[in-house]
Amino acid sequence: MPATAHGLDELKALAGTDLGRTEWLEITQDRVNTFADATDDHQWIHTDPERAEDGPFGAPIAHGYLTLSLVIPLFNRLLQISGISMSVNYGLDKVRFPSPVRVGAKIRLGGVVDTVEEVKGGVQMHLAFTVEIDGGDKPACVARAVYRHYA
């Protein structure tokens, strides 16, 4: 069950909170192909399963930016926010992709609210995200994200 916050004061109170982890999400070849179409990145390591079997990863892999983009829907499974007028993704301070995500693997998101500070009309949250791979030694992605929430 996701954490909840209603209004700016409850968001501020989340500073330092570990939001836990989501359920696992399987990365399918269809999702990878759809992302390839959307981004015009059809490199064979992503979209050609037969060739990718003989490649450096032994299977097709998800695009790093596909993994990063899944932070958005997965974050909504960690924290439900109400009582505000708008939330915006303000950006990323740092992103790394320590391990590839093979097609068929399962990933999940872990998140920690590092800081919450006031900005004009709202608050700014810095979150540490880790995208884990089921059975993996290293995460697929580690990122420090910044969100703004307005009254």
Image (tube, rainbow, N blue to C red):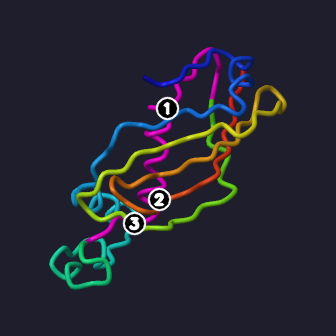
Taking the image as shown, residue 35 lies to the left or right of residue 85, namely: left
In this rendering, the answer to whether 79 lies above or below 138 is above
Query: What residue type is disc 3 on?
Result: His
Secondary structure under the numbered disc 2 in the rendered image = loop
**Residue at 53% over, 28% down:** 79
Front residue of this view, candidates 1 and 87: 1
Callout 3 secondary element? loop
**x, y percentage for residue 116?**
76, 33
Of 120 and 23, the residue lying toward us? 23
Q: In which quadrant of the rendered view does residue 33 lie?
A: bottom left
Segment colored magenta: 60-86
Residue 107 relative to residue 30: left or right: right
In the image, which disc is placed on residue 63? Answer: 3
Please, is residue 80 above or below residue 128 in the view? above
Separation of marks 1 and 3 at Cα, in angstroms: 23 Å
Q: Going from the N terminus, do you reach mark 1 or mark 3 first? A: 3
Task: List the residue tagged with mark 1.
Answer: 78
Q: Residues within 10 Å of mark 1 (few under 14, many from 20)?
A: many
Residue plotted at (36% across, 63% down)? 101
Q: Which mark is residue 25?
A: none
Asked if residue 34 is among those painted magenta in the image, a careful observer would answer no
Front-lying residue, 2 or 8: 2
The C terminus: image quadrant: top right
Q: Residue furthest left?
A: 50
Q: Is residue 11 above or below residue 39?
A: above
Query: Percent from the top left, x then y, of residue 93?
Result: 70, 56
Mark 2 = which residue? 139
Secondary structure, mark 1, is helix
Mark positioned earlier in the residue sequence (2 or 1) = 1
Q: Which corner quadrant holds the N terminus?
A: top left
Residue 123 % position (x, y) = 76, 30
